[in-house]
Image (cartoon, rainbow, N blue to C red):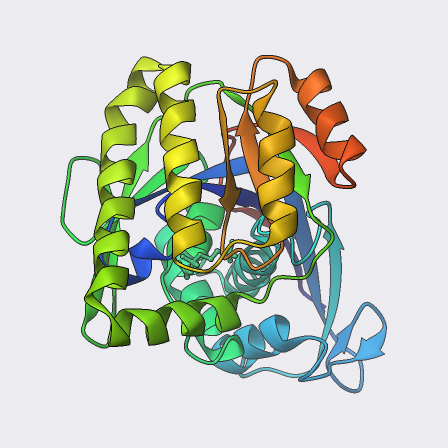
Amino acid sequence: MAAARASAPGKVILFGEHAVVYGEPAIAVALSLRTEVIVKEGGDQHRVNGAPLSPYHHAYIKDAIDGLWKGGPLDVRTDSRIPSASGLGSSAALSVATVGALLQLQGRFAEELVAREAYNAEVSAQKGRGSPTDTSTASHGHAVLVDGQKRDGLLWDVQRGERRWYLHHLDVPPLTLVVGHTGVRGRTADEVAKVARFVKRTGFAREVIRDLGRVARSAIPLLARQDKPALGQRMDEAHNLLRILGVSHPRLDELCDAARKHAYGAKLTGSGGGGSMIALTDQPEACAAAIRKRGGTPFTVQLGGPGVSASSW
Ligand code: PMV
């Protein structure tokens, strides 16, 4: 019986969450935390970690299998170091690793194809959510600049409805971030839908989206120069704009305030409404302690690292 394994990294969004859904740029960076998926042919029905495949519990895996697999039953095993519902890209890493393992099993594994198929699987599992940021970052690794227009370092482009996103490679500086998880479950689809209602109704919300894009754009040269004070200031600015957009949470604001005493800047990361914040710091221990003192769960991460990898036997 054939078997394949694939592994994919989690990510943080440094700048541009939510605005990227409307064609503004976003910068996402892969993490050293990864998810591994093993698929083996065999058995009487599809199973995930020993239990029958459930459309409710295993939506991402089911949508990947439905989209890519015409063969017999599969035994799927998952192992993730990425905390779930934390804004660290655990669902995208699971989609990417599952798609990677399925394509490897068919002898069709390639980074770009994994990114495309994983995005399709995520869109269908999340009932039409936003951008290909997470799935492309989990596929490519390193850092990815997502933009509504083509720039240097183009990897691929993805179209959905009227939107087209261009995904680019960015070099990642060796930065340390402290992530603070609020313990509050943020639901990406709900937050994206909330912003969509706001954007539809008011020109003000569209202006905030444009401001978020401006902040993300201004961060690109700062990242290349590793200008941490200026990057931190942009992070604070982005957090305020996201707060105005209605996607922060009192716990996120508190953890950002606590972290800022030991950091260049701090902001929520990902869809918000709970989930996690990130702080850019040279004092990870002090920053983590401040987050813990305010009831958050901190962990220190190094930015960068490889994208999806696969093997079979
Ligand atoms: O919560 P996350 O890490 O899945 O990030 C969502 C990012 C959004 O911009 C809010 C939505 C998207 O698909 O880009």
Foreground of the two, 195 or 71: 195
Q: Is residue 306 left or right of residue 242?
A: right
Foreground of the two, 313 or 137: 137
| Residue 33 visible in the snapshot | no
The residue positioned 43% from the left and 33% from the top of the image is 236
- Which quarter is ligand 1 in? bottom left
Quadrant (top left/top right/bottom left/bottom right) for the N terminus: bottom right
Residue 79 spot, x, y in % from top left: 75, 53
Outermost residue to the right: 50
The residue positioned 49% from the left and 48% from the top of the image is 138
User: Would you place residue 222 above or below residue 145 in this image?
Assistant: above
User: Would you place residue 99 above or below residue 269 in this image?
Assistant: below
Say which quarter of the image contains residue 112: bottom left
Q: Is residue 70 left or right of residue 178?
A: left
The residue positioned 64% from the left and 38% from the top of the image is 255
| Residue 96 visible in the snapshot | yes
Q: How many marks?
A: 0
Residue 202 spot, x, y in % from top left: 24, 70
Residue 127 spot, x, y in % from top left: 47, 81
The residue positioned 77% from the left and 77% from the top of the image is 47
User: Would you place residue 281 above or below residue 255 in this image?
Assistant: above
Foreground of the two, 6 or 51: 51
Residue 257 spot, x, y in % from top left: 59, 33
